[in-house]
Image (tube, grey):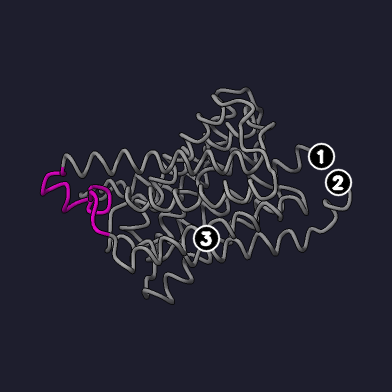
């Protein structure tokens, strides 16, 4: 069975590209959700739907949900939750392509953290990739601006904590099932959403903060039909895409699928233009391209060193 599973690289890559295309489309509607409710309400409601779906599917097929290492799953879920809070929070207020570029700095952070704290040796190509990725970050963040917005930093936080989640997955959660990790991640995200929702409902943000970060600081509002619809689309679409991506990883080598995941940046930019006529300026485009190149170098060189 393993030999058969690993022998269909074209299909595996196509499934990953389809998954990224779906996510690139549905994530563009975070802007619509942001106009209807707050970030915390969105995460709480979406997580409830996804967790119920996962639990129901596991019950039907008799799959195990109980983690083998609860502590490891909690740590990974916390990293994932912070990453997604930062990513979706940014996506609700800046162009999706730029928020996605921040998320895809994850491989760069993985490499740096692994080298600094786990003694992983890296060669000249991956050092070059870190430099190229750093240049891309500078191009997007624009530190020379007189008005430095927190929304230019938040996407990087999503990439940093996504990297921590990836490291935790590899080093501490290798024995866990996919459904256990998915349930834990979305349960944690729902918990974060519930806590943020309670806080900003009971302790409303100041007028200045609410004006600067409306999506982050909004408490509970009566859910509109638009909010319910797109939150359900997000829940079902995310599960569908994750299922495709998981199957892609089963069908071919992980490095091929990891490269295909960068299609998300193209998909996000394409749908942003088609739906909202959003076009990143030349500097942002170069920054996104640099981050993509850095990530691709890291993935391909990592694969070469494993062979």
Which residue is at a point 24% across and 58% down the rendered structure image?
Answer: 222
Nearest to N terminus: mark 3 or mark 2: 2
Which numbered circle lies on residue 59?
A: none
Report the Cα–Cα distance between label 3 and label 2.
Answer: 29 Å
Check disc 1 and report the residue beneath it. Answer: 307
Q: Specify the quadrant of the image occupied by residue 98.
A: bottom left
Q: Depth check: give the residue in front, 174 or 295.
A: 174
Vertical arrangement, residue 41 with respect to residue 282, above or below: above
Q: Residues within 10 Å of mark 3 (few under 14, many from 20)?
A: some
Q: Specify the quadrant of the image occupied by residue 91.
A: bottom left
Mark nearer the viewer, 2 or 1: 2
Q: Which region shows up in magenta?
A: 204-222
How far across and how far down the image is residue 240, in percent?
59, 60
Q: Are marks 3 and 2 in contact (CB under 8 Å)?
A: no
Q: In the shown orientation, is residue 66 left or right of residue 235?
A: right
Check disc 2 and report the residue beneath it. Answer: 2
- Whether the magenta-drawn stretch holds residue 212 is answered as yes
Query: Circle 3 — which element?
Result: helix
Which residue is at a point 23% across and 55% down the rendered structure image?
Answer: 221
How far across and how far down the image is residue 305, in percent?
75, 37
Mark nearer the viewer, 3 or 1: 3
Which residue is at a point 68% across and 43% down the rendered structure image?
Answer: 63
Report the Cα–Cα distance between label 2 and label 1.
Answer: 18 Å
Q: Quadrant of the C terminus?
A: top right
Q: Depth check: give the residue in front, 158 or 85.
A: 85
Vertical arrangement, residue 227 with respect to residue 125, above or below: below
- Whether the magenta-drawn stretch holds residue 39 is answered as no
- The answer, for residue 160, to whether it is visible in the render is no
Check disc 3 and report the residue beneath it. Answer: 236
């Amino acid at each position: 069975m393993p030999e058969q599973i690993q022998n269909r690289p074209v299909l595996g890559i196509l499934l990953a590209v389809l998954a990224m295309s779906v996510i690139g489309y549905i994530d563009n509607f975070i802007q619509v959700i942001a106009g209807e409710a707050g970030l915390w309400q969105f995460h709480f409601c979406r997580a409830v739907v996804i967790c119920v779906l996962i639990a129901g599917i596991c019950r039907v097929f008799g799959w195990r949900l109980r983690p083998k290492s609860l502590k490891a799953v909690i740590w990974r879920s916390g990293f994932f939750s912070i990453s997604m809070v930062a990513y979706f929070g940014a996506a609700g207020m800046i162009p999706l392509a730029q928020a996605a570029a921040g998320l895809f700095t994850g491989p760069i952070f993985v490499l740096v953290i692994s080298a600094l704290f786990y003694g992983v040796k890296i060669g000249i190509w991956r050092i070059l990739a870190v430099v190229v990725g750093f240049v891309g970050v500078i191009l997007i963040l624009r530190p020379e601006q007189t008005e430095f917005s927190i929304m230019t930093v938040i996407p990087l936080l999503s990439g940093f904590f996504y990297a921590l989640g990836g490291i935790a997955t590899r080093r501490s959660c290798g024995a866990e099932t996919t459904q256990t990790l998915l349930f834990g991640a979305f349960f944690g995200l729902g918990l974060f959403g519930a806590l943020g929702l309670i806080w900003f409902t009971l302790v409303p943000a100041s007028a200045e903060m609410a004006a600067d970060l409306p999506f982050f600081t909004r408490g509970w509002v009566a859910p509109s039909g638009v909010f319910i619809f797109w939150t359900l689309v997000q829940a079902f679409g995310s599960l569908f895409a994750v299922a495709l991506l998981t199957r892609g990883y089963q069908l071919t080598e992980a490095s091929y699928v990891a490269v295909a995941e960068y299609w998300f940046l193209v998909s996000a930019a394409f749908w942003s233009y088609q739906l909202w006529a959003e076009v990143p300026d030349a500097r942002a485009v170069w920054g996104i391209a640099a981050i993509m190149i850095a990530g691709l170098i890291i993935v391909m060189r990592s694969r070469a060193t494993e062979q």
